[in-house]
Image (cartoon, helix red, strand yellow):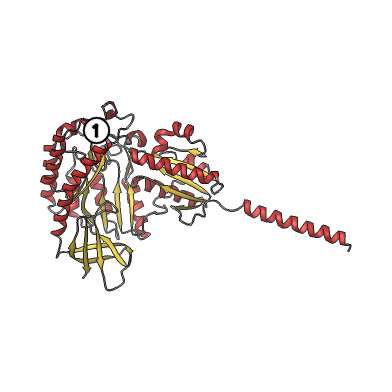
């Protein structure tokens, strides 16, 4: 063989090797990172999306810290100004990574995209595609993936394995003047009891011990498909599931509240004695302006009725500070309401002036600084109440779910506390505990918003 033939052979070998390398690089599988902003309902949507991608043999992860993904899907929030700003900044950050060649594609979905799609396409055209809240099948088509309707409960949990959020309905028929959620999520649509129970059973098989039922409005459940409020029936069906130890209720509307829910809660041991019921305000002037369809007197009567059935129930509420026209008298009335009702848990938002809501026709006449000041003032009242209620628990032994271990200490929750928004229990244990395990803890210390105790 001549040197020329050898040279040609070497060049052919090098060319073939280069083609193989290029082909390997081209065929590298996509990895999708899903970033979730906003509420627990968005989190469930992201989990469902990831489950669909994985079922279509597409690698998907939540909030990927390894940075080895090449595609990002941002599930946005469009609820209030701060949430919208966070969503936009997250989009811009990932578009910048795409420009640097660190990402191949950026997709945007969720509430912000639903509400402002046309504006976003014009202002941030570098995003590959925008999708609304109900356009999951269209998003999947971008990956040449098919929506698989049979995947009940088959979602990639972004929570620890022992608890999960479960959406029982979508949308809302209420007309609160400050709220843009019906614009982004549409009208109320209940899921069937059968589908919810099947999902819960699937989650329990995967190790979930607590489910948190979420909806824009829990008490409305069933009115659209069963022509009556069916949350009590659903709760009984879920409580029958073996291995489901805690069922928690989030976001119940106070107007025309069905007390049968509380009766079921009393009867079934695995339904947490916990109710998240956003009231938004206590001044009748503000309640009327907010179109809440309830008065302070009616709210006080409802809370009294609930506590008459379950005296030790944990009541959580959410309030709004700085609604248009709110006076000092309104703020003082809200503070006196808190002192009288003594809620276990309270969260507060400052009012956000949202387009296309009826409150947007009002003058947003309170400065951001004053809104924050009022919110702080209101929370100082609640802080004292929370500390007093926590001090009452010293010496008591409570059932605690171990959530995590931080800085060498175990952290958990009682049935009276939901994830992230409520109290935590610092658990002192001389033995190793398993995450997701239930332990009995004797409370030894109380803080403003947390407890500490020893395993007994």
Query: Does 28 appear above or below 338?
Result: below
Q: How many marks?
A: 1
Rate crowding at label 1 as few (under 14), some (14 to 19) or many (20 or more) other CA atoms within 10 Å. some
Question: Could you tell me residue 386's position as x and y percent?
Answer: 17, 53
Residue extending farthest to the top is: 361
Q: Quadrant of the C terminus?
A: bottom left
Query: Does 175 appear above or below 259?
Result: above
Going 42% across and 53% down the picture, which residue do you hit? 156
**In the image, is 408 to the left or to the right of 321?**
right
Question: Could you tell me residue 99's position as x and y percent?
Answer: 54, 43
Q: Quadrant of the N terminus?
A: bottom right
Residue extending farthest to the front is: 369
Front residue of 153/194: it is 153
Question: Could you tell me residue 315's position as x and y percent?
Answer: 18, 49
Question: Could you tell me residue 5's position as x and y percent?
Answer: 86, 59
* Mark 1 element type: loop
Query: Does 125 appear above or below 338?
Result: above
Query: Does 291 appear above or below 205?
Result: above
**In the image, is 341 to the left or to the right of 67?**
left
Going 22% across and 42% down the picture, which residue do you hit? 375
Going 26% across and 27% down the picture, which residue do you hit? 363
Observer able to see residue 318:
no
**In the image, is 192 to the left or to the right of 8?**
left
Q: Which residue is mark 1?
A: 366
Quadrant of the image occupied by residue 320: top left
């Amino acid at each position: 063989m001549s040197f020329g033939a050898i040279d040609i052979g070497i060049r052919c070998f090098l060319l073939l090797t280069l083609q193989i390398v290029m082909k390997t690089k081209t065929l590298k599988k996509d990895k999708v990172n899903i970033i979730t902003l906003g509420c627990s309902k968005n989190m469930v949507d992201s989990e469902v999306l990831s489950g669909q991608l994985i079922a279509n043999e597409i690698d998907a992860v939540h909030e990927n810290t390894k940075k080895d993904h090449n595609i990002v899907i941002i599930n946005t929030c469009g609820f209030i100004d701060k949430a919208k700003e966070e969503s936009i900044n997250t989009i811009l950050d990932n578009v910048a990574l795409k420009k640097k060649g660190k990402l191949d594609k950026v997709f945007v979905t969720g509430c912000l995209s639903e509400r402002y799609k046309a504006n976003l396409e014009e202002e941030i055209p570098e995003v590959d595609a925008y999708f609304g809240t109900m356009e999951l099948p269209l998003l999947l088509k971008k990956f040449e993936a098919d929506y698989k309707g049979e995947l009940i409960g088959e979602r990639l949990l972004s929570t620890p394995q022992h608890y999960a959020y479960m959406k029982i309905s979508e949308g809302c028929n209420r007309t609160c003047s400050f709220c843009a959620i019906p614009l982004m999520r549409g009208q109320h649509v209940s899921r069937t009891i059968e589908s919810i129970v099947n999902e819960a059973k699937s989650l329990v098989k995967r190790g979930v011990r607590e489910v948190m039922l979420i909806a824009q409005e829990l008490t409305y459940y069933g009115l659209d498909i069963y022509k009556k409020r069916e949350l009590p029936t659903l709760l009984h069906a879920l409580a029958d599931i073996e291995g489901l130890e805690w069922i928690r209720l989030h976001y119940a509307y106070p107007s025309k509240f069905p007390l049968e829910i509380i009766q079921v809660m009393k009867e079934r041991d695995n339904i947490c004695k916990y109710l998240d019921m956003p009231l938004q305000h206590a001044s009748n002037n503000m309640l009327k302006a907010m179109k809440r369809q309830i008065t302070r007197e009616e709210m006080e009567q409802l809370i009294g009725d609930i506590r008459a059935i379950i005296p030790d129930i944990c009541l959580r509420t959410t309030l709004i500070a700085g609604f248009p026209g709110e006076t000092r008298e309104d703020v003082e009335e809200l503070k006196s309401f808190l002192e009288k009702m003594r809620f276990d848990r309270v969260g507060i938002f400052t009012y956000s002036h949202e387009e296309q809501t009826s409150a947007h026709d009002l003058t947003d006449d309170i400065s951001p600084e004053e809104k924050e000041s009022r919110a702080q003032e209101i929370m100082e009242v609640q802080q004292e109440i929370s500390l007093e209620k926590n001090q009452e628990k010293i010496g008591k032994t409570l059932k605690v779910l171990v959530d995590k271990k931080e800085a060498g200490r175990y952290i958990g929750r009682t049935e009276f506390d939901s994830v992230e928004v409520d109290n935590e229990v610092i658990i002192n244990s001389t033995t190793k505990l398993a995450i997701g395990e239930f332990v009995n803890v004797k409370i030894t210390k109380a803080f403003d918003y947390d407890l500490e105790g020893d395993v007994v």
